[in-house]
Image (cartoon, helix red, strand yellow):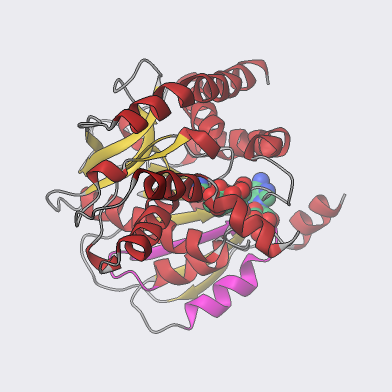
Amino acid sequence: MLRSILRSSTSNASRRGFASGASPERKVAILGAAGGIGQPLSLLMKLNPLVTRLALYDIAGTPGVAADVSHINTGSEVVGYMGDENLGKALEGSDVVIIPAGVPRKPGMTRDDLFNINAGIVKSLCTAIAKYCPNVGTSVAQMALVNMISNPVNSTVPIAAEVFKKAGTYDEKRLFGVTTLDVVRAKTFYAGKAKVNVAEVNVPVVGGHAGITILPLFSQATPKANLSDDEIVALTKRTQDGGTEVVEAKAGKGSATLSMAYAGAVFADACLKGLNGAPDVVECSFVQSTVTELPFFASKVRIGKNGVDEVLGLGALSDFEKEGLEKLKPELKASIEKGIKFAHQN
Ligand code: NAD
Ligand code: LMR
C-alpha cells in the first residue's frame, strides 16, 4: 500500500545538475541510493571524475538525495528516480550499475537471514537491468557492469546470474559481487597489528562474503611482517566477523554503511578505470570462477574494457589458509545453490 502511494506520488524523475564535457562519458546507476549505503555512496560517486552521469534510484527518497548531491560542484549530472515506473529510465545507458538495495542485518542475524527479503528485490532489479541497460552503440549488446552489494552476496550474485541467463543477456565478465569491504578491513586490521603504513598494505581476501567464507590471505600480505600464528588467527577471525562487529556496535540501527560506501566507491572506480582501458586494474571480487570447483568464488580479478579480463589464481597458501579454504567450501556451495534454486523457482 505504502509502496503504491510512493509510486503514484513520484511518477516524474527529478533532473538535477549539469553535464560535463569529460570523455569518455560514463553513466553510473545506484539502485537503493536513498539507503544507509546508497547516500554516502552517491556522494562518493559524485566526487569521482570518471562519472559523467549519476542516476540515483530507490523506491523512496531519491528526489531529496539527488537534489542534495547535485549541488556539489563536480562535473557529473545527477538525476533522481523513484518508483518502479522510473527504473528503466534510471538504468538506460548505464556503464556500471551498483546495487545496495535491500534490508540490512540486526544483531543476532546472519546474512543468510536476509535472503527471504533481499532475494526478491535483487531478482526484480536484475530483471530490469537485463531489460533496460544493455549498452547500445556496440555491435553486440553489452550489459552494464553490475556491482552487487546486497546481502547475502554469496546467494545474490548467483541469483543475478540466473536472471540474466534466463533473459539471454548473461555475460560472466560483467557480474561482480562486491567483497571490497573485506579487503578494506583486512588492510586496516593488518596495518594496526603489523604497525605498518596502512596506505601501503595489500591483502587478498578470497572465498565469499559471510563468516568463514571470508578468507583473508595474510600469508600474502605486504609489507611483510613477522606476526605469530596466534596473531594471524585473530586477524582472520576479526576480518571474518567485521560485519558483525559493526552490526553489534550499531545495536539494531543497521550494518556497515560508511565503510561500505567507501569500499563500493573503490570497487566502482576500478570498474570505470577498467572500462576506460587503464592497465593493471586488479581488485578482489566474487565472480564466476574456475579457481576452485565452486561456480562462483572471490579472488583477485583483473578488470578491463569488457569487465573481467582475468580471474587470478590463489597463489601459495599457508596450511592455515588451506584448511580455511576447505572449511568454507560446503557453506559457500550451499549459499550459491540456494540462490540458483530461488531464481529457478520464483
Ligand atoms: P538500508 O535499509 O539503509 O538501505 C537500503 C535501501 O534499499 C533503502 O533506501 C530502500 O528503500 C532500498 N530498497 C529496498 N527495496 C528496493 C528496491 N526494490 N529497489 C530499489 N531500492 C530498494 O540498508 P543498507 O545499510 O544500505 O544496506 C543495504 C544492503 O547492503 C543490505 O542487504 C546489507 O546487508 C548490504 N551490505 C553489503 C555489504 C557488502 O560488503 N557487500 C556491506 C554492507 C551492507
Ligand atoms: C558487512 O560485511 O559489513 C556487510 O556484509 C553487512 C553485514 O551484514 O555484516
Depth check: give the residue in front, 101 or 188. 188
Q: Residue furthest right?
A: 1
Residue 51 lies, with reference to residue 85, above or below; the image says: below
Residue at (75, 55) in percent of width and height: 7
Left or right side of 167 for 125: right
Query: Can you give x and y, in whole percent of width and height, for residue 338 in the image?
Result: 60, 21
Left or right: residue 74 versus residue 258 is left
> 301 and 107: which one is in front?
107
Q: Tally the marks.
A: 0
Q: Residue at x 47, y 26 (%)?
A: 328
Q: Is residue 164 left or right of residue 245?
A: left
- Res 255 seen here: no
Give x and y (percent) for residue 197: 25, 69
Residue 53 is covered by the magenta coloring: yes
Image coordinates of residue 188 in percent, x first then y, are 38, 62
Farthest residue, direction left: 279
Numbered range of the magenta stretch? 47-71
Q: Nearer the viewer, residue 337 or 306?
A: 337
Indicate yes or no whether the magenta region holds residue 300: no
Q: Nearer the viewer, residue 278 or 263?
A: 263
Can residue 18 be seen in this snapshot?
yes
Residue 67 percent location from the top left of the image: 57, 77
Q: For residue 116, what is the image quadrant?
A: top right
Q: Quadrant of the C terminus?
A: top right
